[in-house]
Amino acid sequence: MKDLHTRHKAVLPDWLALYYGEPIELTHGEGRHVWDAQGRRYLDFFGGILTTMTAHALPEVTKAVAEQAGRIIHSSTLYLNRPMVELAERVAALSGIPDARVFFTTSGTEANDAALLLATAHRGSNQILAMRNSYHGRSFSAVGITGNRSWSPTSLSPLQTLYVHGGVRTRGPYAALSDAEFTEACVADLRDMLGQTRGVAALIAEPIQGVGGFTSPPDGLYAAFREVLKEHGALWIADEVQTGWGRTGDHFWGWQAHARSGPPDLLTFAKGIGNGMSIGGVVGRAEVMNCLDANSISTFGGSPVTMAAGLANLTYLLEHDLQGNARRVGGLLIERLRAICAQLPCVREVRGRGLMIGVELVRPGTDEAHPEAAAAVLEAAREGGLLIGKGGGHNTSVLRIAPPLTLTVAEAEEGAAILERALQEV
């Protein structure tokens, strides 16, 4: 393994992050488990960054991929593509957006890039509102709107971005307020900002911030924001790359916790829909989606093979009510973790929805982030046979827990027990 790590460092850039002091190579998986090159089995509570959404080696998906690959692997969007049309029909119907159009990409970064292009072209403005502590991808434009210093390596951007309060409930200047007062204060901040700008194109927001540590505002905040945005003609882009497809349990899309003012104008998705295959996309109102006045194609977006995988995965998810499983098993898991962490001085908060759970760590006796503890727990959990993630903003350290949506109660209990031992070691 050290040999492979040495080869990795010799040919790949230094900024390409790796987990663990001694990185591991995952060679295969099944269900909610993966194996490394030494044959050791792990319970997977991160799913390749919330991407293996259903299960590793799901037979329905692997069969669909193999059958489509045996027919034709690639054609581009210059030709009619039946799997792409069929998946677009299903995504449009599920989106909640009237008269929706769908454009497929190969990643969430590219989906957000496309949404920003559409919003700025439609509005004739390059001004974007984004949330503090946010993350939207690693392209030039996506980095330019990311409100998380750890993931934004340059201040250069094709967009003019202003950052709004509200994505983080329990930190910042409004943390001590009630939910209603918090929402009121954030709306007032948004109104004030819009009063000092000219022609904002859109607000882009993750309903639950992913890389930022699974933080979220009170339900209804983005509905209140949308009412203000409408007064100024600005669009709402919901970044559902991590929250989509029922992961939160309560809703199929994260925006539905803020549905009072209707659906977003544009919704971006990726990660889980392909269960590991490279699918992303943007779905939105026809008026916005059709606004470009130049030709465009996608060479790899909407690939017949990835579309076949997406169709099979989505069918499985809906037929087996994995949203309901996320709600039930995720609810049990979060309560188990809250009970475990209640007496641990290094844990500030356990938060989340469904199978999207964050455990925020601090230096005992303080409110200060403890990144060393997060790294240590990550290592200890791996030693115990559990893979989790980590994240957070500039002043937070969060363990990120997001298993495949087929997680069983027994596996949830097993993972919680391993994590308990890892936390106690720290």
Image (cartoon, rainbow, N blue to C red):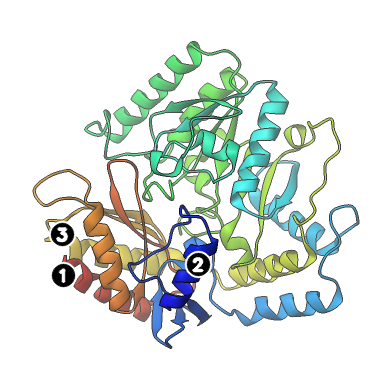
- Residue 225 drawn at (x, y percent): 48, 28
Q: Determine if residue 209 is in view.
A: yes
Taking the spot 15% from the left edge, 50% from the top edge, the residue there is: 363
- Residue that label 1 marks: 425
Which residue occupies the foreground of this view, 69 or 18?
Answer: 18
Helix, strand or loop at disc 1?
A: helix
What type is the residue that disc 3 sits on? Ala
Furthest residue in direction left, as rendered: 365
**Image disc number at residue 77:** none
Label 1, label 3: how far apart the Cα atoms are? 16 Å
Residue designated by label 2? 8
Q: Is residue 359 left or right of residue 236?
A: left
Which of these two is toward me, 42 or 235?
42
Image-quadrant location for residue 289: top right
Mark 3 lies on residue: 342
Cα–Cα gap, marks 3 and 2: 40 Å
Do the CB atoms of the residues marked 3 and 2 lie less than 8 Å apart?
no
Q: Is residue 413 above or below residue 332?
A: below
